[in-house]
Amino acid sequence: MTNKAREIKLIALDMDGTLLNGAGEIPEENRKAIKEAQDEGIHVVLSTGRSIATCKDHAESLFLKTFLVTVNGSEVWDWQGNLIERNLVEVEQMRWLWELAQKHGAKTWAISCGKTWKDEMPEDLDKLEWLKFGYQIEDDTIRNNVLKELQARGVFEISNSSLVNIEVNAFGINKARGLKTVCERLGVTMDEVMACGDSLNDISMIKEAGIGVAMGNAQDIVKETADVTTKTNDENGVAYAIRTWALKKAKEPALKK
């Protein structure tokens, strides 16, 4: 990518570690920059690993009137709460994921349609529809062993939202795919998207966006993948990125490629 003028029509923002600061709040400077972008006619979309239940209030507080990409792309919603797309993990795979957790003594969370299950699962998994499974594993050796077994299974989209967790979606389901659905609805191309994130579950959208932005606090692999790096989530990095590369109100640092 060369340092040329690029019109951004859509800004995709991860939440935890990106839009939200370390206290889990949206800094006022980020709010102001998002409003500035919206006032210029730029769509702002939250693209998160969270479920609709845990991100809808944030979207409403920002007066976002577009779409929400949730559960790493497993669901896409419009701003009025209508489901646009849903991509499920098969029940038999969820059962295997739960058994793998028990085998390794791992802490877990799982998202079904309408509920998040922490360190437990219902007796009859078949009665629910499943969107994502997650492992929280502090021990590097155990986490790597779990990761190897997941990869060997060959039927999952595997990422993370922190260095000590593993997130599992249905194969091919990620934030980039969710954003493509949004772009089609809005008449925007991925080249006209600026995507900001900090973890492995953000890499797909950072790779495919016209401008991929890594947070200053991002994992190293995310920084290596991104076109540019902004400030940290505790330094209003989202506001800096919006004003620098979408609104071009600040002097633009050279893009990496």
Image: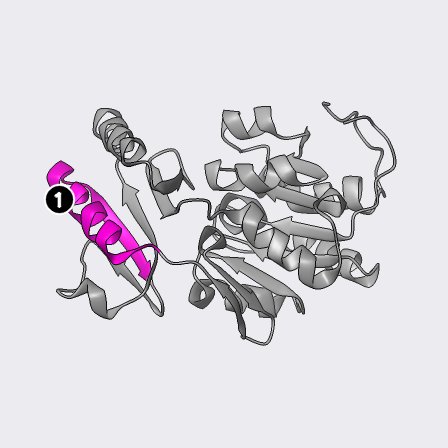
Q: Label 1: state its secondary structure.
A: helix
Residue 86 versus residue 220: which sits nearer the camera? 86
Question: From what the image shows, is residue 129 above or below residue 153?
Answer: below
Residue closest to the eye, 158 or 140: 158
Please state which of residues 237 and 191 is positioned toward the viewer in this rendering. Answer: 191
Is 103 magenta? The answer is yes
> Hey, what amino acid is under mark 1?
Gln
Identify the residue at image location x=18%, y=43%: 101
Image position of 26 with respect to 152: above or below = below
**Can residue 195 be found in the magenta stretch?**
no
Q: Which residues are magenta?
A: 89-111
Q: Nearer the viewer, residue 184 or 256?
A: 184
Residue 192 visible in image: yes
Question: Looking at the picture, how far across and down is residue 76, in whole percent?
Answer: 53, 62
Q: Write the residue at 43% across / 58% down.
A: 87
Q: Which image quadrant: the N terminus?
A: top right
Quadrant of the rendered image containing residue 79: bottom right
- Residue 225, given in percent of the width and then of the height, sits at 59, 27
Determine which residue is flagged by label 1: 102
